[in-house]
Amino acid sequence: MVERPVGVFDSGVGGLTVVSQLFRILPQEDIIYFGDTAHLPYGSKSKEAVTHHSLNIANFLKAQKVKIIVVACNTASSFALSSLRENIELPVIGVIEPGAQAAIDTTRNFKIGIIGTEGTIKSRAFEEVLKRIDKNVKVFSQKCPLFVHLVEEYSLDKPWTKQIAEEYLSPLKDEGIDTLILGCTHYPLLKELLGRIMGQEVSLIDTAEATAKAVKRTLGEKNLLRKGSRKAVYKFFVSDDPEKFLQLGRRFLGKSIDKAERINLEEMK
Ligand code: DGL
């Protein structure tokens, strides 16, 4: 069991921000990644659709004999985590609980902001977990549907990206939050811009880093941490043409991916 890989999935390339943190925090672990590029974006899809795809992917990862499943997508974590935990007999870690805990550990005025996709904000998943941890916390949410496209279209430094970000963040600034959860896989790439807009007194929570730490904790508790000195092996799968995934992947992962294999999960059923 210890020697088995860590399974990670996302709607596409975004989950590679979580993988880059796993590389840093758990360098000895093998990783199998699945990017559901044929069905992205998840952010504007229904709970039913996202849960359906998430279960298919989790079953695929289970068949690859992974020892844990990391839902490296905020929308899939928001909509499908409980179904995954009910149906897959493996530990399942999402990005919501680690991100929410990191925000509670950081805030001083207990006013926390969340930004994410339409689905993540609509699900209120972050809000529920935050209030479960501390019922006195005040939560302010804002969907930012254009951010994913701006990041994928190489528009990080464009003036319109700054304008859109200012527009999205202005209500959260007005509420006086001191902590902002970056509740989407793509937002770590916008961290510098968002930090400049929110100002130094607001802490930004990167759910990718908090999640990688939670994976380490869970594997440790279950005695599943790999200890050997063999170099870790990484495999990437996608459900559509790998070309764009490979192109964009480098920016999310911080290093290039040589190969991604395309597979159709519906055909495999
Ligand atoms: N990975 C998604 C998330 O973190 C963003 C991209 C999408 O909408 O599929 O919510």
Image (spheres, rainbow, N blue to C red):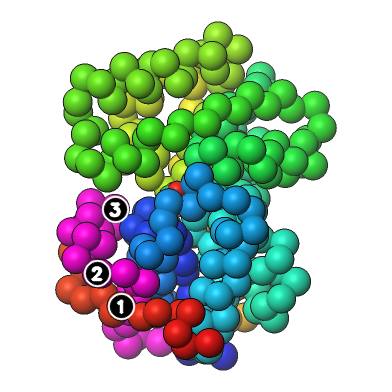
Q: Which residue is mark 3?
A: 252
**Residue 188 spot, x, y in % from top left:** 37, 41
**Is residue 43 in sight in this rendering?**
yes
Residue located at (25% from left, 21% from top): 160
Label 3 with label 2: CB-CB less than 8 Å: no
49 lies left or right of 88: left
156, above or below 44, in the image: above
Pointer 2 or 1: first along the chain: 2
The segment highlighted magenta reads: 226-254
Q: Amino acid at mark 3?
A: Phe
**Residue at the front extreme, as displayed:** 267
Residue located at (72% from left, 44% from top): 129
**Residue at the top extreme, as displayed:** 174
Label 2 with label 1: CB-CB less than 8 Å: yes
- Residue 249 within the magenta-colored segment of the rendering: yes
Q: Amino acid at mark 2?
A: Pro
Q: Which residue is mark 1?
A: 262
**Residue 72 spot, x, y in % from top left:** 49, 59
Question: What is the spatial separation of the Cα atoms under label 2 and label 1, in whole angstroms?
Answer: 6 Å
Give the total number of marks visible in the rendering.
3
Q: Nearer the viewer, residue 190 or 205?
A: 190
